Image (cartoon, rainbow, N blue to C red):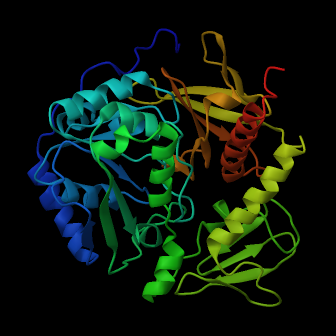
Amino acid sequence: MLDSTPRFDMKRAPMRQHLGWLIYLLSAVVLRMHRNRIERENMEGIRAPYLLLCNHNAFMDFMVASHVVFPARANFVVAIDGYLKREWLLRFIGCICKRKFTNDIQLVRHLRTVVQRGDIAAIYPEARYSLCGTTAVLPDSLGKLAKILNVPVVVLICHGHHINSPFFNLPDHHVKGTRALAKCILRPEDLKNMTPAQITERIRESFVYDDYAWQKEQGIRITYKNRAVGLQKVLYQCPACRAEYRMASEETELFCKACGKRWRMTELGDLEATSGETEFAHIPDWYEWERENVRREVREGRYDFTCKAHVDALPNAKGYIHLGAAELRHGPEGFRLTGHDGTAPYEVKITVPEHYSVHIEYEYLGKYGDCVDLNTLTDTLYVYPEGEDFAVTKIALATEELYALEEDNRRKGKVGD
């Protein structure tokens, strides 16, 4: 079935952006509702073309970016599911299609075309919404890309978008006073005298943010009554009893079904235990504790996950193809997905060095629940694990930690010995 299905045409050159003025006006309505303020730093003399790198917490990020670039034209890199049933529109407004976390040389060619014709190349290098309002992993290749494009590098960091519409709880929480800072961090003369690794490090230094810390600093209170709902998707392990996959939530509370401990999410975004010790008041601290636990599993050789799953494919923008049941394995060798598409058996392997991270979704499209989004250069597969003994957040953390271990071993000269 998949073999005979046409793939999305990734080679087609991106169009110049149309309807930029309309996007600007429609975005202005939303930004005004949230009393958004955009600040600029070191932007004197910066005009298109340039490379715009934006952090990614919610759809409102695109609205802010449209105001930063206006009236210049920009081409935004967008994941293939954004094109679903509306490929013509996305191409018309200048979007460039990308399958997440793939090494795509064609994308580099498209971005070079964009800047050569005098427009702005806009990228969300975290490649997914931040899970808890802090910086996600950035690829090592950013420095090489900046060198190739040889235009100013501008970083756009938005504050307040995660707490307004967190990835685990998307409804608008009506946050007022969101902020954004557009800052030029590198100019062509800087790029000339720096190595790709130095450029990547400069970008990473400029990409540090924490929406919950920002919320508390600004004193922004969120009275949304269901503000803790879905938080167990991110905080899947109980710090009190160490049980995994037994966390749950309701309204403003997070609780463990294994030991019964409960935490209340305050209006300022902190967590408070309803009884006993508050292990982690700051949500990102809990998340990083989970990462440390996963890192230990990976480095001790104990991480190995296997499950039955449902699989949908998105080979093009026309619609999903249901592939049915499959088996997913994730471990030291990377991802291995095996199944039958109704016509023939298939196997997809993604080794550890191929993916420095992986895209995940919570309750994706209301279908089967949470999913892992596996991508090759020609296919996007949405893998929905069955049962309750898993967390796609842990799979994402493990992907990053497996890659980090691989890189450590490579640097030490152990790989291939």
Query: Residue placed at 72% from the left, 78% from the top?
Result: 280
Relative horizontal placement of residue 51, taking residue 287 as reference (left or right): left
Residue drawn at x 84%, y 52% is 296
Q: Taking 400 as reference, is 103 above or below it?
A: above
Q: Residue furthest front?
A: 193
Question: Where is residue 240 drawn, in percent x and y?
Answer: 85, 75
Q: Is residue 222 visible?
A: no
Q: Position of residue 50 (x, y in %)?
A: 24, 44
Q: Is residue 294 left or right of residue 118?
A: right
**Location of residue 376 with respect to 49 vertically, above or below:** above
Residue 21 is left or right of residue 266, and the answer is left
Q: Quadrant of residue 110?
A: top left
- Residue 94 in picture, x, y percent from top left: 21, 37
For residue 206, side relative to residue 308 (left or right): left
Residue 371 position (above or below residue 149)? below
Does the rendering let one see residue 96?
yes
Q: Nearer the viewer, residue 107 or 365?
A: 107
| Total numbered badges shown on the rendered structure | 0
Residues 36 and 206: in front is 206
Provide residue 162's location: percent of width, then percent of height: 46, 67
x 29%, y 43%: residue: 189
Decide which of 204, 391 is in the foreground and name it: 204
Q: Quadrant of the C terminus?
A: top right
